[in-house]
Image (cartoon, grey):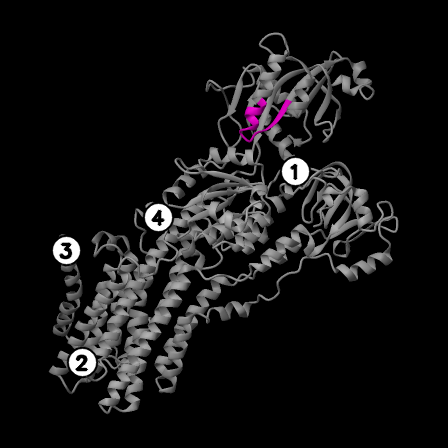
Amino acid sequence: MLSFYIKSSEETEAELSTSIKRGLSYREVSKRQKDYGENSLKADETFNWWEVLLDQFRDFMVLVLLAATTVSGLLGEYTDAITIIAIVVLNAILGFYQEFKAEKSLQALKELTAPEAKVIRDGEITEIPASEIVPGDIVYLESGDRVPADIRLNKTRNLEIVESSLTGESLPVKKHEDRLSSTPDSIGDINNMAFMGTMVTKGSATGIVTDIGMETEMGQIAHMLADENQQVETPLQKRLANLGKVLVTICLLVCIAVAFLGVLRGEPIYKMFMAGVSLAVAAIPEGLPAVVTIALAVGVQKMMKKNALVRKLPAVETLGCATVICSDKTGTLTTNKMIVDEIYTPLLHYHNNTNNGHSFISSNHKKVSPKKNKDLNLCFQIVALCNNTLYTKEQGIVRGEPTEKALLQAAVDYNITPLSFSDITYLDEIQFDSNRKRMSVFYKDDSNQVVMFVKGAPEVIVPRCKKIITDNKNGELNHKTTENIMQKNEEMANKALRNIAVGYKVISYDDYKNKNEKLEDLENDLIFVGLMGLLDPPREEVKDSILKCKKAGVTPVMITGDHKATAIAIAKKINLFSKNADNKVMDGKELDSLSDRELNQKINNIRVFARVSPKHKLRIVSALKDRGNIVAMTGDGVNDAPAVKSADIGIAMGVTGTDVTKGAAELILADDNFSTIEAAIEEGRGIYDNIRKFIRFLLSCNFGEILTMLFGMLMGLPLPLKPIQILWVNLVTDGLPAIALGVDPKDPDIMKRKPRDPEEGVFSDGLFKTILGRGLLIGLITIFTFYRALELQPDHLDFARTMGFSTLVVSQLIYVFECQSVRSGLSLAKVIKNPQLIMAVIASFMLFCLVVYIEPLAQIFDTHPLNLENWMTILVLSLFPTVFSVIYGKIKDRIF
């Protein structure tokens, strides 16, 4: 957008080579359509379902599993190969099911462009598809129209446009055609232009098209969405990818070492290949990708019950380590519904005692009513009668401008409606406009007197008043009283209130009939009744949610297109500013004056950004990320979409959010409730804890299997376990309990911890040592059992393998209960709180018994039936690692 707003409409007309009266000729339109193209937003068409499906197979560990499948197939181990393939496909289906929602962001943006437009072509007004508009077209706008392009207004008549799709602010903006004297602070201050996708709510206008399609302000958002289309890996994805590489490296090194030792001993090459496959299967936790996916999917279901809808699985984990929440103000921290928050009259100062409706108390905290308080009653009468809102007895308030609706609703909540006055008759009204800044209505009573009710801007109404209401007769409005009223007006404005002054005057019927000749005089000498301050109030639950976020080490930041004073007032109401902290506020103009380096230095201390544009929001998120923050960005309007998409986790509002923002987000709040974010953070942290629990469980077990195989080869023994037996342990014996660990109850102190360091590894807090230690114990008891059984029955390899197989299974099923706590050992209280885990362990053991005792399965898995004595031996040996761990823990606590 060139700076047409600082040029006159005549200069704009000349620069774009057009005519306000005649518009463009059809020949010129045809030429410009070739030069500028179609007036539409280009959608990204590269995303399709098969790419979503292929993404499920691009994970490094999945690729390793596919390689293991190929090797197994080449060696004739088809059962192993089929089993691994089944697991990989299951994991892909789970991921595909959750993520198959095509990215509709840019397509949804198209819906915000007008389908038709009225233009002047060759001197005639004609209606055309909006896509055919070109720069220089003269467009006619009226109430109800969606603006089809960016337009420099030429002539306006009471024009008001809702620009929430660009600025996020729901109040209509009054527009004019006058040139601006300087570059405005933000797009919300450009009042002589209309922008594509915004909605005309009042009045009419003509204007000159300055930009179309992707060159419009809406098009710039489309560009930013396209630029942010590449998804960044979440911390967990990075950790698991690195884990897979480490495991494969270890596996290859061990396989090479084993092959080398085997060759030295003269072992057959085929046997060495089988040993390598067995080690590969043992080293790679085949169930890990599926279990992680299932755990995240379970988290999705939990969040859904709390009104948080997850579009992409990894977002569940990312939210748990969020350090900053950037939140839009309107509709997210506030209700997006105007109310009358304060009423000041010369008699009393009233305060609304609720954010939901109207319930006023006086400044001395006493309840009030219009019946007892005549000043309050008169305020409500004036705003009920001097109002353009459509009201019916059956439906109540049907439609109207937000400010008008809020004023009337305050009266209606006290049973004062436009239908309450049967003793007076409506005569006429003088509409509000941007020049008069007031509205007057005329009513006649039975005595043929006319009452003129007036409301408008305080700076316009108060100077026109001569008297004020008092307890008895009306008093004179002197200089001191005027100063007091204007001081109250300023105090209320500093609280983010939008003030309306109300008054009235009794005139003769003859004066009314001649009102058009002497309206200015007629609207003087008013009786001042009061100031009514309106506010888009904070959501009631936001204050507590922000406090909980702070305790959890998560910093809330407000980002709004509203004025700085309004933003600060709301921030104070919701306790956004922290005590003993450098709480800074910055507006868009200040933001533009900073280099990226300067912004990065200041960004962590700023709690409120005001008068910002979509580009500003994107820059803020980028700066926060550059400082190492994990950023969550909430939003509802189209203006929020690029920043939402750029954030580590984007959060869209489900009720008021546009399809554009929902398409850009990973998480959608079904109830538009800020407190849902706090609940989602708690759930995300719990899920990450549980992922660490089953990583501890699975990798300890896998390391035990590696050592079992390695010890057997080093000792010159036959393979202690067959590949299919290891697969059974990894997928069934370990898989079911690991899934149950994924729903383990959260620790009570989970929201009292600071967020995890984004660079913190999965194996922090000594987890790696725990995995190595337990894996060593499991490996030792398994190879010991196998060796003793083989020694007792050297001719029955299947019996020895079954004994080792069983010891491995039972020791792991016992160990899973220790994994319920990352920070402490076995806890009976935690075991009881997770009945799913108990059932999973029982189910795993029963399934294992089927493999041992059912003949067809026993043949496949090469197992041998065991007697009670065998089982007692297995149980005693399997308990050894747990007993050792408990004793070691107590000794360690006493010493250290």
Q: Quadrant of residue 821?
A: bottom left
Q: Secondary structure at mark 3?
A: helix
The nearer-to-camera label among 1 and 2 is: 1
Instruction: Name the residue that disc number 2 marks.
Output: 800
Look at label 2 and name its amino acid.
Ala
Crowding around mark 3 (Cα neighbors within 10 Å: few <14, some 14 to 19, many 20+) is few
Q: Report if the CB atoms under discs 3 and 4 are less than 8 Å apart.
A: no
| Residue 553 rendering spot, x and y as whole percentages | 38, 45
Q: Report if the CB atoms under discs 1 and 3 are less than 8 Å apart.
A: no
Instruction: Name the residue that disc number 1 marks.
Output: 172
Q: Residue at x 80, y 49 (%)?
A: 15
Left or right, 592 with reference to 855: right
Instruction: Name the residue that disc number 4 marks.
Output: 754
Look at label 3 and name its amino acid.
Lys
Identify the magenta region.
489-501
**C-alpha distance separating marks 2 and 3:** 35 Å
Q: Secondary structure at mark 1?
A: loop
